[in-house]
Image (tube, rainbow, N blue to C red):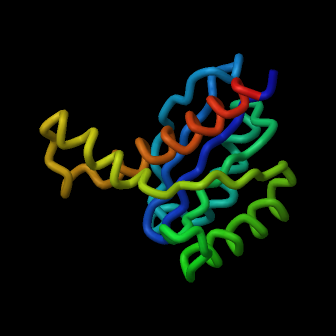
């Protein structure tokens, strides 16, 4: 069964997560630092090929009232470029409060958040993907 790649898009960092082969559990992948990587699309394409990814789930930021803001428009632009370069199906998943939940989990672990921003992005990607996988399981 092809795996699913979860993405928490940010202009500075891109959090990544991958499903297990059965599509039950989301696991972290290294965060992409957009300042240090030449082409994020090439890096994501490598992951898609290496991990046999069949679909991508991209966290979609909505305002608390459900509307789409400026950040949502940037995610749509990123998704269009990603689909063009990689050619995989992309589903959006509501990511409201995933960063808040990630920070809460880190605080419970008593980790220093300022030094662990890339971990926040990883956890956010896992929360996005796990929510999507759980939804699939309940259908």
Most foreground residue, 66 or 59: 66
On the image, the x and y values in percent for residue 43 come to: 63, 52
Q: Is residue 8 above or below residue 35?
A: above
Q: Residue at x 81, y 21 (%)?
A: 1
User: Which image quadrant for residue 48?
Assistant: top right
- Name the one closer to the observer, 41 or 93: 93
Give percent across and percent down for residue 6.
Answer: 61, 44
The C terminus is located in which quarter?
top right
| Picture residue at 38% right of the left edge, 54% below the top | 99
Q: How many marks?
A: 0
Q: Residue furthest bottom?
A: 70
Q: Residue at x 70, y 26 (%)?
A: 138
The percent position of residue 22, horizontal first and vertical second, equals 71, 17
Residue at x 69%, y 44% (from the top left corner): 46
Residue found farthest to the front: 65
- Vertical arrangement, residue 22 with respect to residue 33, above or below: above
From the viewer's perspective, tell me whether residue 57 is left or right of residue 2.
left
Seen from the viewer's position, the closer of residues 16 and 40 is 16
Where does residue 77 sit, x and y in percent of width and height?
70, 75
Q: Nearer the viewer, residue 61 or 126?
A: 61
- Residue 129, located in which quarter of the rendered image? top right
Task: Please indicate whether residue 60 sits to the left or right of residue 37 in the image.
Answer: right
């Amino acid at each position: 069964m092809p795996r699913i790649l979860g993405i928490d898009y940010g202009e500075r960092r891109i959090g990544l997560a991958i499903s297990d082969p059965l599509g039950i559990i989301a696991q972290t992948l290294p965060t992409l630092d957009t300042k240090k990587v030449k082409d994020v699309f090439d890096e994501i394409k490598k992951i898609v090929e290496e991990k046999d990814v069949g679909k991508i789930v991209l966290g979609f930021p909505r305002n608390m009232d459900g509307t789409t803001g400026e950040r949502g428009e940037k995610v749509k632009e990123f998704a269009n470029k990603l689909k063009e370069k990689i050619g995989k199906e992309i589903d959006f998943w509501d990511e409201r409060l995933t960063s808040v939940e990630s920070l809460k989990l880190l605080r419970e672990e008593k980790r220093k958040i300022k030094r662990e921003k890339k971990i926040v992005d990883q956890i956010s990607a896992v929360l996005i993907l796990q929510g999507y996988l759980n939804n699939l399981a309940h259908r």
